[in-house]
Image (spheres, rainbow, N blue to C red):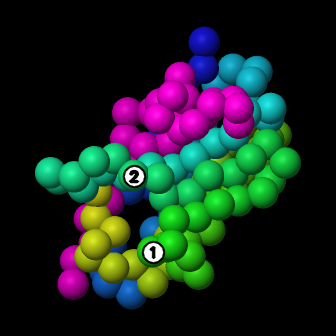
Amino acid sequence: QVQLVESGGGLGQSGGSLRLSCAASGSVFSSYSMGWFRQAPGKQRELVATIHSSGAPTYRDSVKGRFIISRDNIKNTVYLHMNSLKPEDTGVYFCATGSSGRTWPNWPYWGQGTQVTVSS
């Protein structure tokens, strides 16, 4: 069983930075893709960034050039460095992991989420 625990959320200012961390338990971490997703009030959950087991990242267009996803396979941790924050980045951020052969909505392991609020 894999458990994911997010941390690092909170209140950020427009133009500021926050770093999210997601610590994973279990032995599958290094062989699975990892990702960060967010859900704003009244909206569907959306992909923010993913990182393949090879280290290759992908980003949604609205965060390209501002957010960086990285992973540490020794610490079983994935990070999301969020820079140049905007109010529209506000939401609950979830980390998740699963086989790269599955699309992310079907990934089996999800964290509980951490709130990020960006003030203007």
Is residue 104 rendered magenta in the image?
yes
Residue 7 visible in the current orientation:
no
Nearer the observer, 112 or 100 = 100
Q: Relative to residue 65, is residue 32 depicted above or below?
A: above
Horizontal side of residue 49 vs 15, given as left or right = right
For numbered disc 2, what is the local secondary structure?
strand
Q: Are marks 2 and 1 in contact (CB under 8 Å)?
A: no
Q: Quadrant of the N terminus?
A: top right
In the displayed orientation, state which residue is furthest to the left.
Answer: 42
Q: Position of residue 50 (x, y in %)?
A: 62, 52
Residue shown at the point (59%, 81%) measured from the top left: 65
Q: How many marks?
A: 2
Instruction: Quickly name the residue at label 1.
Output: 62
Residue shown at the point (56%, 57%) measured from the top left: 49
Residue shown at the point (55%, 29%) measured from the top left: 107
Q: Relative to residue 65, is residue 61 depicted above or below?
A: above
Q: Quadrant of the C terminus?
A: bottom left
Q: Amino acid at mark 2?
A: Glu
Is residue 31 rendered magenta in the image?
no
Q: Position of residue 64 (x, y in %)?
A: 56, 76
Residue 42 visible in the current orientation:
yes
Instruction: Quickly name the residue at label 2.
Output: 46
Q: Position of residue 103 (x, y in %)?
A: 57, 37
Horizontal side of residue 22 vs 37, given as left or right = right
For numbered disc 1, what is the local secondary structure?
helix
Which callout, 2 or 1, points at the residue further toward the start of the chain?
2
Q: Amino acid at mark 1?
A: Ser
Magenta segment boundaries in residue numbering? 92-120
